Image (cartoon, grey):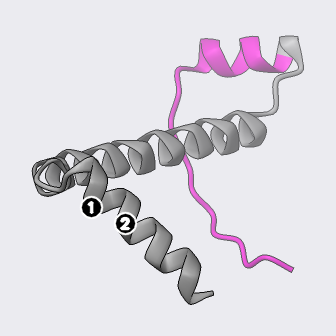
Amino acid sequence: MTEMATISAKIPKEKKKKMEELGISPSEVFRKAIDREIEEREWEQVIHKLDEARPILMKTSKEEWVRAIRESRDER
């Protein structure tokens, strides 16, 4: 079983009441929002790393990439 941690948040009473009226689960909303934020930040990190790698990758010609891929396949 996954180990869990507890977080809390303060919201205006009107919003809490509206959530209750609409049957909205705060826990589910928090989990989904946190999952979305984590995914977005991870993608931002990937894009940043690709931007850093781009100048290095651009120095390599298409022919060198093709040769490296063929050599790698031949080693299998």
User: How would you rate the neighbour count of disc 1 (Cα within 10 Å): few for under 14, some for 14-19, many for 20 or more?
Assistant: few
Q: Residue at x 74, y 11 (%)?
A: 18
Tell me residue 25's x, y (percent): 81, 32
Residue at the farthest bottom position: 75
**Segment colored magenta:** 1-20
Q: Which residue is mark 2?
A: 67
Mark 2 and mark 1: span between their CA atoms? 5 Å
Amino acid bearing label 2: Arg
Amino acid bearing label 1: Glu
Q: Which residue is mark 1?
A: 64
Tell me residue 11's x, y (percent): 53, 27
User: Which quadrant would residue 69 be assigned to in this image?
Assistant: bottom left
Q: Quick check: marks 2 and 1 in contact, CB under 8 Å?
A: yes
* Left or right placement of residue 11 versus residue 47 in this view: right
Q: Residue at x 53, y 45 (%)?
A: 39
Q: Secondary structure at mark 1?
A: helix
